[in-house]
């Protein structure tokens, strides 16, 4: 049923937001080809100044790493703003999905620019390339601007990509988005996290070889969710607010989450480093991995499906919002713990289950445990908001499909935010329902001296912080169990969150933030990032952090602060709503307040954080049911 509803949403979107002209992309002719490490061809160009990065003198490059004959991985690189780029560290950012473009992170969260409703590009003062060279990668093949085989096509009423004989939009397809897309072929992309790791490693190798001037120092890896959106979220927003008629959407009929990519990809990088160091991989470069950051990650489904119940029912979220009546709560509990239901199916999947077992488990758990929140009209990625949620802004999609921009970056296909073929490929192996060694890989990275920072916006339901906190304890980093939560100090002297840290492992809870923390709380996101990549503690940025350094945060065993319902919305916001990071919610519209919940509670909450007083009205103690041994 969920698949049918999402397909219907896509069809409605196409009917409401049909383009008025066809747009096909010609092969770029101005790319320079350079051999990267492993002799991988890297086709690239310098992006014209003023394209996204508006800071004079700061360069950016984009192009493709051709890792296989039918796998062409798109990248967009930005130099560091505030230091000499040749001396700055290199950080890779990828979004998850699986199947979601890293242009989401670039334009919605932490890139040099954003795009407003009128298509104007504006400066992001909190961009992460303030302090690091940043490399955004659309991965795996067919995601975003990456492609396998580019084809002229349209989207059918069933949501399928249908190839056209040539780059001419026939009359029968004129209303269903003719465009150049990657051929949706599952065999030409990855179908699991472990299967995707080698292609990511090759992409990094290619870039480092083609741009050695930016690969001299430490390497950092930052990711979010599976590595974010199911394209379902984008479809639902576009259906209700058809403001971007040139977005190319392909249906992804499953909810996917993240946290798989970060641990597994970087464990693979470290294993390849050992082979490089002993001479077994000639032509490859040792990647000096220093830091791994994972925002609102999806690691262990057994733990995190239970966290859906804990976040919405008992003990509940810190926004004092219960979305369900008692009947629905009982229904979800039974679907979770009843004989043969979600918990048991997930155990079966993770104890040697075949792909079919894991697929069935994930489908059942998603539909019966996760999806009910969406049925209540709430946004999975920010429980404070109703759907369609205009935040974070997605106006950039139209910008990325403009011929001028595509020529500027050397794109060979139209942009899609999420790719259904990739999502279906991962679904075919049940990857979403597998823990797949993510916790063990995280522990191994910590033991090798890599600085690992897990953080979570506490309004996100999809990969919520209650589950993330349990995951952090499961990593079992030395000393973490006896560390305490302490306030994270920032340059604005407002408490935006707390952190629990022991040496080179940290878990941070970020207040008043949905799934994409750098959008909702840009200052603390940037300062956490800056501290971590420079080997400093997350709480203050004053103490040097190394493996076994003995640093341990001091504070309460639990993060007890409660926001209350002051920023919870009970009316759907219009498409032109704007987000105020000071108010932690939408700006007033037409001179009236758009705050939901108790306005007095909202004011009290802001004053409380400003005074850095975190005394809660009642202790908040997450509680979980059975847990897989």
Image (spheres, rainbow, N blue to C red):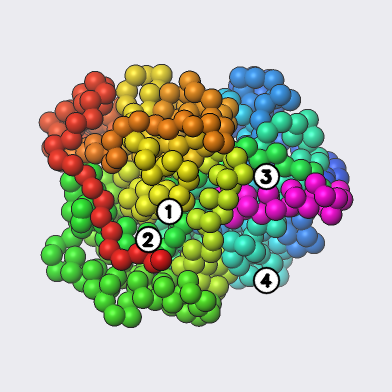
In the picture, which quadrant includes the C terminus?
bottom left
Q: Which of marks 4 and 3 is nearer the N terminus?
A: 3
Foreground of the two, 376 or 215: 215
Spatial separation of the CA atoms under disc 2 and disc 1: 10 Å
User: Do residues under tags 2 and 1 come within 8 Å of each other at their CB atoms?
Assistant: yes
What residue is pinned by disc 1? 474
Question: Of the numbered discs in the image, which one, if any, rests on residue 75?
Answer: 3
User: Do residues under tags 3 and 1 come within 8 Å of each other at their CB atoms?
Assistant: no
What residue is pinned by disc 4? 187
Circle 2 or circle 3, nearest the eye: 2
In the picture, which quadrant includes the N terminus?
bottom left
Circle 1 or circle 4, nearest the eye: 1
Q: What residue span does the magenta drawing correspond to?
A: 262-283
Q: Which residue is drawn at 76% across and 43% down?
A: 286
Secondary structure of residue under mark 2: helix
Location of residue 148 (image quadrant): bottom right
User: Do residues under tags 4 and 3 come within 8 Å of each other at their CB atoms?
Assistant: no
């Amino acid at each position: 049923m969920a698949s049918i509803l999402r397909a219907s949403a896509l069809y409605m979107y196409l009917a409401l937001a049909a383009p008025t002209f066809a747009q096909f992309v010609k092969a770029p002719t101005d790319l320079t080809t350079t051999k990267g490490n492993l002799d991988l061809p890297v086709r690239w160009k310098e992006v014209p100044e003023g394209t996204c990065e508006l800071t004079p003198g700061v360069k950016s490059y984009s192009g493709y790493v051709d890792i296989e004959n039918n796998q062409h991985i798109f990248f967009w690189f930005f130099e560091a703003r505030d230091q000499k780029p040749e001396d700055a560290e290199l950080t890779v950012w990828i979004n998850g999905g699986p199947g979601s473009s890293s242009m989401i992170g670039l334009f919605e969260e932490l890139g040099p620019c954003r795009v407003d409703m009128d298509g104007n590009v504006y400066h992001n003062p909190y961009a992460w390339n303030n302090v690091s060279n940043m490399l955004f990668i659309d991965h795996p093949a067919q995601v975003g601007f990456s492609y396998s085989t580019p084809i002229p096509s349209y989207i059918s009423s069933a949501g399928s990509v249908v190839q056209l004989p040539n780059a001419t939009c026939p009359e029968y397809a004129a209303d269903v988005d003719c465009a150049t897309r990657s051929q949706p072929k599952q065999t030409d992309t990855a179908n699991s996290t472990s299967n995707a790791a080698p292609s990511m490693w090759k992409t990094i190798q290619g870039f480092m070889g083609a741009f050695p001037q930016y690969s001299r120092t430490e390497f950092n890896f930052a990711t979010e969710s599976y590595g974010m959106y199911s394209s379902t979220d984008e479809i639902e927003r576009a259906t209700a607010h058809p403001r971007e008629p040139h977005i190319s959407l392909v249906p992804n009929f499953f909810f996917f989450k993240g946290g798989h990519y970060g641990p597994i990809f970087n464990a693979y990088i470290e294993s390849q480093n050992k082979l490089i160091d002993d001479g077994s991989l000639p032509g490859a470069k040792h990647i000096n991995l220093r830091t791994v950051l994972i925002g609102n990650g999806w690691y262990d489904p057994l733990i995190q499906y239970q966290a859906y119940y804990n976040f919405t029912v008992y003990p509940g979220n810190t926004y004092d919002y219960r979305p369900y009546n008692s009947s629905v709560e009982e229904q979800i509990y039974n679907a979770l713990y009843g004989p043969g239901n979600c918990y048991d199916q997930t155990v079966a999947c993770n104890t040697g289950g075949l792909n079919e077992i894991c697929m069935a488990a994930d489908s059942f758990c998603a539909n019966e445990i996760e999806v009910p929140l969406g049925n209540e009209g709430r946004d999975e990625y920010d429980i404070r908001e109703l759907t369609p949620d205009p935040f974070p802004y997605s106006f950039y999609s139209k910008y990325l499909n403009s011929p001028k921009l595509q020529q500027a970056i050397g794109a060979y296909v139209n942009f899609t935010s999420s790719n259904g073929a990739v999502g279906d490929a991962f679904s075919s192996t049940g990857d979403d329902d597998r823990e797949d060694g993510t916790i063990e890989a995280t522990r191994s990275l910590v033991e090798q001296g890599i600085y690992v920072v897990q953080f979570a916006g506490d309004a996100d339901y999809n990969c919520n912080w209650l589950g993330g906190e349990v995951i952090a304890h499961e990593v079992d980093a030395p000393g973490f169990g006896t560390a305490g939560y302490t306030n994270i100090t920032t340059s604005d002297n407002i408490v935006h969150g707390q952190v629990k840290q022991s040496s080179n492992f940290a878990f941070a809870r970020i207040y008043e933030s949905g799934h994409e923390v750098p959008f909702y709380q840009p200052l603390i996101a940037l300062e956490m990032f800056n501290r971590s990549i420079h080997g400093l503690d997350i709480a203050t940025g004053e103490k040097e952090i190394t493996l076994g350094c003995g640093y341990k945060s001091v504070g309460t065993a639990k993060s007890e602060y409660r926001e209350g319902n002051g920023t919870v919305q009970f009316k759907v916001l219009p498409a032109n709503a704007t987000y105020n990071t000071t108010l932690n919610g939408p700006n007033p519209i037409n001179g009236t307040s758009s705050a939901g919940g108790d306005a007095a509670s909202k004011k009290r909450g802001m004053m409380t954080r400003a005074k850095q007083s975190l005394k809660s009205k009642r202790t908040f103690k997450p509680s979980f049911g059975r847990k897989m041994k």
